[in-house]
Image: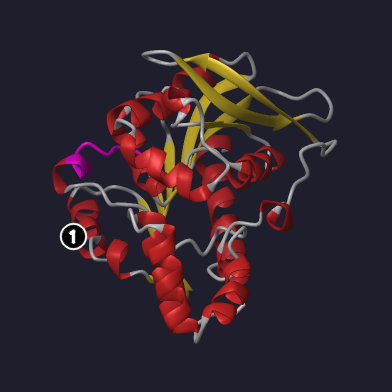
């Protein structure tokens, strides 16, 4: 769906900063041409998890469930999905890392997509320490901002150890993340033992010093129109080249930040999302299955 670029930029500002909802709606009305027009466009901006669901929770091909596991400082809530059909050999695991609002239905759906591709998928909730991610997007955003960032990251990354210890694990492990999770996926490849491949969707790049420590292949998916995130690409790419890190960097022209998130129709780009996801699964197949 085509939406005025200024509206999408405003929405991205709203979900990534402390912009209050009232101020967001006032600015939206000015761009859209009035309150009625703003209210009309709002449904295509904000998450619609039911509309975006690609794999039903009761899909017979997989088994999905909520659980808690022991994190470094306490219990971590998570969603796990695994292939269900028939007896199979042990499989590789994939850690799925959410955006800056904690675990939600969209990320659970992504975990099910990973499971359909033949992987054990775990999606931890970084807001477990705060009681879990609220369903309200603004409340989740604000809670995320108020919660200790180091604790969030440590809890999420402890999912690597959970995956490695699962009885169905074959010892191979990948990480995929989106926005905040994209940056953390790259950090996981540097800071966590056992990660064999990492995929970043429009997330913060590693510093030059951290890139020196990067020893596993990475796949990078960036939106074409995402100035805030893309500002760091050139420096990151130079560091990847200098350190001879295997990587694939893919730009999707004309897309906005969050183009893979199909719960927000205004930002979602179906063609780019499907291509980026096919590249993601092919990447994991290459480094985790072959």
Quarter in which the N terminus is drawn: bottom right
Residue 164: horizontal and vertical position, in percent? 51, 19
Q: Is residue 234 above or below residue 121?
A: below
The image shows residue 252, relative to residue 105, as above or below, that is below
Q: Examine the rendered structure and indicate whether residue 241 appears above or below residue 66.
A: below
Considering the whole magenta stretch, tell me its main secondary structure. Answer: loop
Tell whether position 211 is magenta.
yes
Q: Quadrant of residue 45?
A: bottom right
**Range of residues picked out in magenta:** 210-216
* Crowding at mark 1 (Cα within 10 Å: few <14, some 14-19, many 20+): few
Q: Where residue 62 appears, x then y in whole percent?
A: 77, 34
Q: Residue at x 82, y 39 (%)?
A: 59
Horizontal relation, residue 134 to residue 215: left or right: right
Residue nearest the viewer, comparing 166 with 31: 31
x and y percent of residue 198 in the render?
42, 42
Q: In this view, which residue lies farthest toward the bottom? A: 33
Residue 252 makes an appearance in the image: no
As drawn, is 91 to the left or to the right of 142?
Answer: right
Q: Which residue is mark 1?
A: 235
Q: Mark 1 falls on what kind of element?
A: helix
Q: Position of residue 279 (x, y in %)?
A: 54, 57
Q: Give the answer, above or below, for where 23 lies relative to 279.
A: below
Q: Residue at x 58, y 43 (%)?
A: 107
Q: Residue at x 24, y 47 (%)?
A: 206
Q: Can residue 214 be found in the magenta stretch?
A: yes
Q: Nearer the viewer, residue 179 or 277?
A: 179
Pick whichever, 60 or 33, lies toward us: 33
Quadrant for the C terminus in the image = top right
- Image quadrant assignment for residue 217: top left
């Amino acid at each position: 769906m085509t939406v005025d670029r200024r509206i999408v930029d405003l929405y991205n500002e709203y979900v990534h900063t402390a912009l209050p909802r009232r101020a967001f709606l006032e600015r939206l009305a000015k761009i859209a041409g009035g309150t009625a027009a703003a209210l009309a466009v709002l449904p295509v901006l904000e998450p619609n998890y039911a509309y975006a669901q690609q794999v039903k929770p009761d899909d017979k091909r997989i088994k999905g469930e909520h659980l808690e596991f022991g994190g470094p400082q306490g219990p971590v809530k998570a969603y796990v999905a695994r292939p269900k059909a028939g007896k199979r050999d042990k499989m590789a695991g994939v850690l799925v890392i959410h955006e800056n609002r904690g675990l939600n239905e969209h990320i659970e759906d992504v975990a099910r997509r990973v499971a359909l591709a033949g992987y054990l998928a775990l999606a931890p909730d970084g807001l477990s320490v705060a009681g879990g991610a609220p369903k309200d997007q603004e409340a989740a955003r604000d809670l995320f901002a108020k919660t200790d960032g180091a604790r969030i990251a440590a809890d999420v990354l402890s999912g690597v150890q959970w995956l490695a210890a699962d009885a169905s694990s074959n010892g191979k492990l990948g990480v995929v993340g989106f926005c905040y999770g994209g940056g953390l996926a790259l950090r996981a490849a540097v800071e966590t033992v056992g990660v064999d491949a990492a995929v970043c969707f429009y997330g913060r790049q590693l510093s030059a010093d951290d890139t020196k420590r990067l020893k596993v292949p990475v796949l990078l998916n960036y939106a074409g129109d995402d100035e805030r995130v893309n500002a760091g690409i050139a420096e990151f790419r130079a560091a990847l080249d200098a350190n001879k890190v295997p990587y694939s960097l893919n730009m999707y022209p004309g897309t906005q930040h969050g183009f893979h998130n199909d719960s927000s129709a205004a930002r979602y780009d179906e063609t780019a999302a499907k291509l980026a996801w096919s590249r993601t699964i092919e990447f994991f197949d290459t480094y985790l299955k072959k």
